[in-house]
Image: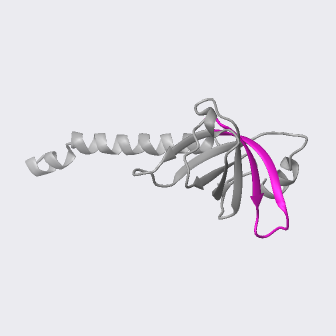
Amino acid sequence: MTTSLLLSKIIDLGEARRQRDRRQAVRAMSSKQERRRNYRRESSDRLFVQIVNCAENPDLVGTTVSCNAVDVSAGGLKVSADRFIPAGCELDLWIDIRSRPGKFFLTSDVRWSHQAEGNGPCEFGVELHEGVATDISEWRAING
C-alpha cells in the first residue's frame, strides 16, 4: 500500500469528533421535540394575560398584559410580550383568534420565560389547564 493511500484511510480524529458531536446534537434536538405532546402551529393571534398568582413577584398579581401568540397547540402556547412574566406564574388568558368570533378564556401556568437583552421583548411558554369555567374543550377541538 502506498503512503498516500494509507494516509487517505486514516481517520481525522478531529473530524470524527465533530461528526459525533453533530449526531449527538441532532439526537438531543429530536428527543426534545418528542417530549411535546401536541402539534404546534405558528400564530399571530392577540391575547391578554392576567397574572393570578406569582410567587416570584407578588406585586404582579392582578396585572393585565397585552401579548401576541407565537405558536399554539392544544396544550400550550408560546407568547411574546413587552413585559417580563416569570416562570411559575399562574395566568388567566383571553385569546382572540382572527378566524373565529369571540374570545377563548383559558387558565395556565408559565413553564419557562426569558427576556431579550436590553429589556427587549419577553417570550414565555404556558401549559394550559383543565377547567370547568374555561373554554379548554373548544380550544382543544380547534387546535388538537
Residue at 58%, 46% (x, y): give it.
Answer: 124
Q: Residue at x 65, y 34 (%)?
A: 54
Tell whether position 93 is magenta.
Answer: yes
In the displayed structure, 56 sits above or below 92; it is above
Residue 99: in magenta span = yes
- Residue 11 in view in this figure: no
Question: Which secondary structure dominates the residues rendered in magenta?
Answer: strand
The answer to whether any part of residue 133 appears in the image is yes
| Residue range of the region highlighted in magenta in the rendering | 88-110
User: How many numbered markers are drawn?
Assistant: 0
Residue 6: image location, x then y, percent: 15, 45
Q: Is residue 6 left or right of residue 45?
A: left
In this view, which residue lies farthest toward the top?
Answer: 55
Left or right: 130, with 123 as reference point: right
Q: Position of residue 129 (x, y in %)?
A: 78, 39
Colouring: one colour
* Residue in the picture at 46% in, 54% down: 120
Where on the picture, by quarter, is residue 90?
Answer: top right
Q: Nearer the viewer, residue 91 or 3?
A: 91
Q: Is residue 56 left or right of residue 92?
A: left
Q: Nearer the viewer, residue 139 or 48?
A: 48
Q: Residue furthest right?
A: 132
In the rendering, at what x and y percent does residue 66 appear? 65, 57
Viewer-closest of 107 and 40: 107
Q: Position of residue 125 (x, y in %)?
A: 62, 45
Residue 19, quarter of picture: top left
